Image: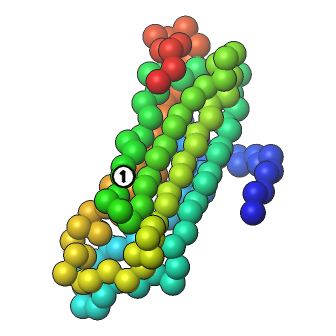
Amino acid sequence: VQVSANISVPGFATRTGKRILIQPAFFQRNVGALFPSNTREHHIYFNYGYTEDDEVTIELPEGWTLDKPQTPMSYNIDKIGQYAVDLKKTVNGRKLIYQRRFVWGKEGAVILDKANYSAIKNVFDKIHEQDNHLITLVPEGQGASNGSN
């Protein structure tokens, strides 16, 4: 299912002095870690394998530009899944395009032994960290990078 919408979210970005901070992983904003506990008593069971494909286009505010944007890290997760992120800006530099793909449960890997919990938690913690990646905007003409990643 593909859904497309134009959304305006006042206050989505955070302003700090002469900078604006944006979390481009729009659909993961304010989502907590999937495995917050350091220990596990039972096996890990996912109902099914799944894929999340997100593409978010962020229109930059007038008078602001990207400040050396860096793309969040991508990961291949053994034979179980993949987390891939791409960050681009349009030719005119006025829009930021964030693409995220998360695949989990490849090859039917939906039941995982609790002995592997530490490694699984580590993977999901890294993904959570990358989903919380921030992009910085600065006023135009204040040393921002005009190149793309």
In the image, taking residue 119 as reference, residue 57 lies left or right, namely right
Give the crowd class for mark 1: few <14, some 14-19, many >=20 residues within 10 Å: few
x and y percentages locating residue 92 in the rendered image: 69, 16
In the image, taking residue 20 as reference, residue 93 lies left or right, namely right
Give the tally of numbered discs: 1
Whether residue 17 is visible: no
Query: Viewer-proximal residue, 104 or 3?
Result: 104
* Residue appearing at x 76%, y 57% in the figure: 2
Figure check: 93 above or below 103: above
Query: Viewer-proximal residue, 117 or 58?
Result: 117
Figure check: 93 above or below 33: above
Residue lying farthest bottom? 42
Q: Quadrant of residue 119?
A: bottom left
* Residue appearing at x 29%, y 91% in the figure: 42
Figure check: 141 above or below 121: above
Whether residue 115 is visible: yes
* Residue appearing at x 62%, y 31% in the figure: 96
Q: What kind of residue is marked 1?
A: Asn
Q: Quadrant of residue 120?
A: bottom left
| The N terminus, quarter of image | bottom right
Query: Viewer-proximal residue, 119 or 29?
Result: 119
x and y percentages locating residue 43 in the rendered image: 30, 88
* Residue appearing at x 70%, y 32% in the figure: 59
Give the residue pinned by disc 1.
Answer: 76
In the image, taking residue 130 as reference, residue 23 lies left or right, namely right
Figure check: 134 above or below 34: above
x and y percentages locating residue 29 in the rendered image: 54, 56
Please tell me whether mark 1 sits on a helix, a strand or a loop: strand
